[in-house]
Amino acid sequence: MLSISTRPGRSFMGRLAKGDDLLQSLENFCQEQQITLGEVRALGAVTRARVGYYDQEKREYYFLKMDQPLEILALVGNISLKEGKPMVHAHVTLGDTAGRAWGGHLAPGTTVFACEFTVQEYQADQALARQDDPATGLLLWPTS
């Protein structure tokens, strides 16, 4: 198990532009602000979405593409380092016109219609950097 002690850093609230790629824009913001550890939340709407599901047996991501307007019911994620750069790892729940919910791992290709976000930066005495985890086949934080 890994556990590190954190303390609050800066807090941000903002809005992404219509047409932005949701994931890339959040990562760009973190890179511009040099946020290497934190959490992100967002709500709003997208014009189309791409979300992933990780098949644990095959160790592959499968992606669902939805070419329709959807509401962002919830987006939660964390910020840490991947190859020395800030990376946003987020999951998103989206709602359609019939009230159905769709969700998964937020992937590039999700286009913003309107999006408001919050980012909470954390300070810590050590960095959290993603690395290959042989047990899962994923890039995860180390266990110790």
Image: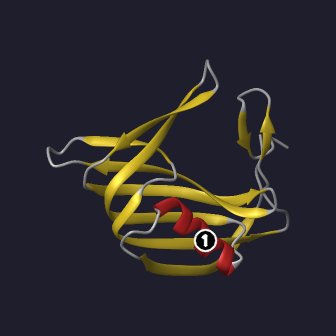
Q: Which of 118 and 47 lies nearest the eye of the viewer? A: 47
**Residue positioned most to the left:** 98
Percent x, y of residue 119: 54, 72
Residue 122 as seen in the image, left or right of residue 84? left
Could you classify mark 1 by the number of other residues whose Cα lies within 10 Å: few (under 14), some (14-19), or many (20 or more)? some
Identify the residue under disc 1.
28
What colour scheme has been applied to the protein in the rendered image? secondary structure
Measuring 81% from the left and 62% from the top, which residue is drawn there?
A: 84
Measuring 76% from the left and 51% from the top, which residue is drawn there?
A: 3
Residue 51 as seen in the image, left or right of residue 7? left
Percent x, y of residue 93: 37, 48
**Residue positioned most to the top:** 57
Measuring 44% from the left and 71% from the top, which residue is drawn there?
A: 117
Q: Quadrant of residue 60?
A: top right
Q: In which quarter of the image is residue 131?
A: top right
Amino acid on which disc 1 is placed: Asn
Percent x, y of residue 96: 22, 48
Q: In this view, does 93 lie above or below 85?
A: above
- The quarter of the picture where the C terminus appears is top right
Percent x, y of residue 91: 48, 49
Measuring 54% from the left and 56% from the top, which residue is drawn there?
A: 77
Q: At numbered mark 1, what does the secondary structure look like: helix, strand or loop?
A: helix
